[in-house]
């Protein structure tokens, strides 16, 4: 029997390997041979368009199928991670938007570096306008027997200035938004919870990390401290009781939980970046006495409040309250998301609440209020 030459065997083997690799995504999509780790961050969610003659003639079926297959083909999570890892290893580039590697493996989003270095400074005139308009709102609420509190969440760049890349080094002479906003808020006597200043003062003595290495928000432990203090400050300002938090235990883990590695998760790399041991408080909510009802709280803020909202702050503490995310989405527990632009009378809607908390991080100070001042003070026809 004639034996095939070695080069023929090699060619057939290579052909079979290439064919298997081409078929593998199809097999994975239909048979689920592997269980790749889901991708982090916001992912495309194109729908599987059903065939019809009309859809075919308009090319909507072809375009829809192309998008669906691109977003849902087998092994997509692995392929995306492989691509991102390759770019990181070869070019030092991250495919996650705005992510920058600092010193010693600390991850930042650029907005926080710009804030800490003063490169996003909007000027004292703009800051004065935003704060003075907020003062008008605060005074109007006080006349109605209601209250407003500004909560300034810390920025990771200012918390870890020694870990920032040299290109964002703050030389001490550049104006920055944070100190000017704090100065103006205090000058107008607007109630202020300055978490950035608080965190910096206890940074050296905190028992557990207040900020993670590979996340952008305060740590779960830091968030617990802020939540407990925020409840107390709101209660003191309103002079009304609120449910309180009772710490039961603290767990520690080298593997980040919750949002403690949210930047890394969004980078979608193959490898795991090094982290340090983090703390995770476990607590119970102490309800009010029978017959007591807490004031209604409206939180207008950014993603630093999302952690509190997700564990049930509005269900268990700020009962009957709402979270207006970036003053854009209207989030109410148990209800579908609606949008602030659909509110017909903004000031009247805000007036339905007993307490308004404006919560935002340093990187969002150029958008201080997220447009609430203009919406509230807009004259009605």
Image (tube, rainbow, N blue to C red):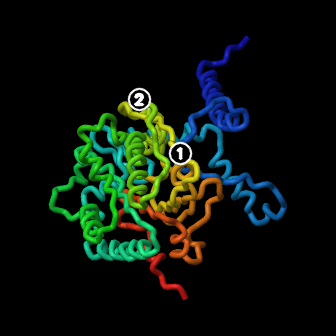
| Mark 2: secondary structure | strand
Image coords of residue 55 (percent x, y):
79, 62
Q: CA distance from mark 1 to mark 2?
A: 27 Å
x then y, percent, for residue 213:
35, 39
Mark 1 neighbour density, 10 Å: few (under 14) some (14–19) many (20 or more): some
Which of the 4 quarters of the picture holds residue 38?
A: top right
Q: Position of residue 320 (x, y in %)?
A: 57, 58
For this orientation, the residue located farthest to the top is: 1
Q: Nearer the viewer, residue 233 or 336?
A: 233
Pick the quarter of the image with the C terminus: bottom right
Q: How many marks?
A: 2
Q: Residue at x 42, y 31 (%)?
A: 250
Residue at image coords 69%, 58%: 63
Q: Position of residue 70 (x, y in %)?
A: 63, 49
Which quadrant of the rendered structure holds the N terminus?
top right
**Closest to the observer: 244 or 80?**
244
Q: Which residue corresponds to mark 2? A: 252
Which residue is located at x 27 percent, y 41 percent?
A: 103
Image quarter of residue 131: bottom left
Does residue 219 show up? Answer: yes
Res. 217 in view: no
Quadrant of residue 188 within the rendered picture? bottom left
The answer to whether residue 171 is left or right of residue 51 is left
Judged by depth in the image, the label closer to the viewer, 1 or 2, is 1
Q: Residue at x 31, y 74 (%)?
A: 126
Element type at mark 1: loop
Identify the residue under disc 1. Answer: 287
């Amino acid at each position: 029997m004639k034996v095939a030459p070695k080069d023929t065997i090699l060619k057939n083997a290579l052909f079979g390997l290439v064919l298997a690799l081409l078929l593998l995504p199809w097999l994975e999509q239909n048979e689920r041979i592997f269980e790749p780790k889901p991708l982090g961050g916001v992912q495309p969610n194109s729908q599987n368009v059903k065939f019809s003659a009309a859809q075919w003639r308009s090319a909507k079926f072809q375009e829809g199928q192309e998008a669906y297959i691109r977003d849902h083909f087998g092994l997509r999570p692995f392929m995306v991670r492989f691509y991102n890892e390759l770019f990181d290893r070869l070019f030092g580039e991250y495919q996650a938007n705005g992510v920058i590697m600092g010193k010693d493996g600390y991850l930042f989003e650029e907005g926080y570096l710009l804030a800490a270095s003063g490169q996003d400074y909007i000027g004292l005139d703009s800051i004065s306008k935003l704060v003075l308009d907020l003062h008008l709102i605060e005074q109007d609420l006080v006349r109605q027997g209601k209250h407003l509190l500004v909560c300034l969440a810390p920025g990771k760049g200012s918390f870890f200035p020694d870990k920032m890349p040299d290109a964002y080094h703050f030389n001490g002479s550049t104006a920055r938004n944070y100190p000017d906003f704090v100065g103006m808020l205090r000058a107008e006597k607007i109630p202020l919870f300055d978490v950035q200043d608080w965190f910096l003062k206890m940074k050296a003595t905190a028992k557990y990390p207040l900020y993670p290495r590979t996340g952008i928000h305060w740590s779960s432990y830091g968030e617990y401290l802020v939540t407990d203090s925020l409840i107390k400050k709101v209660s003191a300002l309103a002079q009304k009781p609120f449910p309180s938090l009772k710490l039961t235990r603290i767990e520690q883990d080298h593997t980040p939980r919750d949002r403690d590695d949210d930047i890394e998760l969004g980078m979608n790399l193959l490898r795991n970046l090094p982290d340090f041991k983090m703390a995770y408080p476990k607590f119970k909510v102490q309800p009010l006495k029978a017959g007591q009802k807490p004031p209604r709280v409206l939180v207008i803020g950014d993603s630093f409040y999302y952690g509190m909202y997700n564990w049930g702050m509005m269900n268990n503490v700020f009962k009957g309250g709402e979270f207006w995310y970036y003053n854009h989405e209207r989030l109410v527990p148990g209800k579908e998301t609606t949008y602030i632009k659909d509110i017909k009378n903004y000031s009247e809607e805000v007036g339905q609440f007993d307490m308004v908390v404006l919560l935002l991080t340093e990187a969002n100070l150029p958008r201080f209020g997220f447009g609430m001042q203009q919406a509230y003070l807009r004259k009605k026809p």
